Image (cartoon, rainbow, N blue to C red):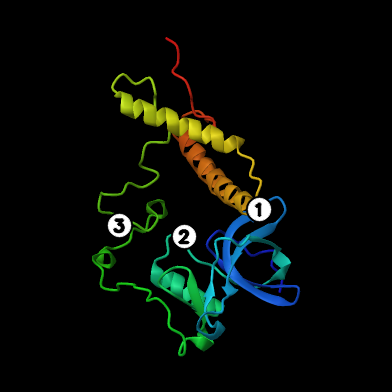
Amino acid sequence: MSTSNIIYKTGDLIACILNRNAKFGEIVGVDLVTNKVEVSCLHRTTLQNHTIWQFEESDEWLVVNKETIVKHVSVPTGSDGAAVAAAWREIGFVAGGDGMSFCLTTDSHTTTLPILECDADSSDDDEEVSANPSMHGYADDGFVVADDDGEPFSFADIDDPNLDEEARKFIEETHKAVHDFEKWEPSEKQSEGIKAYIDNADRKACIQTDNARLARGKSSIAFTKPPLLKRKR
């Protein structure tokens, strides 16, 4: 099956074949340049007669070619626990409530997993979800403002005379952290994956926010270069 027209995104689940071995996991990044997918894979453990599979923090993320993917389950952004659990079942696993433990659906009757609690009677379910995509699944109750109605992003003004010293220090430290992250060059594979994941999410958010600014007649700004020092008057 051709994968050229399939759109992969962070949070989706896949099954792929590497060196004749099946791998199952969650997409943690998509490299648009190399056209490869970064995957955090499940590994079979020795727990409960080898029926428990887990994500292990020490494991490196795999970078796979899209051609090796044999099954893809899209998980909509903002999905609740029930939807995510259903996606895992579609890929062949039952998800435990700890977010780390899984078992094959064929082992579910003989395996004990942490309970995945999904309260179907939650009061949140009584709220009607907005049809406006800019609300990202929230209700039109006035508590959450649609992206199109909100004020476009701009950097906090560190020269604002109404700021107290604590607030000013927080802004300066936050802006410095952005600069430090841009300069960060990870030396470990897992750290490289983390940075790539954040960079991909950041790039998408910056494009969306920049478009919102331009639509309001505001100029584009360099989101990765927030002001560090107070401007001289």
Instruction: Compare residues 204 and 39 and report the one nearer the observer.
Output: 39
Q: Is residue 48 above or below residue 85?
A: below
Please name the residue that numbered disc 3 is placed on: 139
Please name the residue that numbered disc 1 is placed on: 189
SS at mark 1? helix
| Residue at x 46% of width, y 29% of height | 218
- Residue reaching furthest right? 19
> How many marks do you count on the picture?
3
Instruction: Compare residues 230 and 124 and report the one nearer the observer.
Output: 230
Please name the residue that numbered disc 2 is placed on: 77
Q: CA distance from mark 3 to mark 1?
A: 40 Å
- Image marks 2 and 3: residues in contact by CB distance under 8 Å: no
Question: On the rendered structure, is 121 left or right of 148?
Answer: left
Badge nearest the viewer, 2 or 3: 2
SS at mark 3? loop
Q: Amino acid at mark 3?
A: Ala
Residue 54 at least partly seen: yes
Q: Which of the 4 image quarters holds residue 124?
A: bottom left
Q: Earlier in the sequence, mark 3 or mark 1?
A: 3
Q: In the image, residue 32 lies at what x, y percent?
A: 67, 52
Q: In the image, residue 233 lies at what x, y percent?
A: 42, 9
Q: Which of the 4 image quarters holds residue 29?
A: bottom right
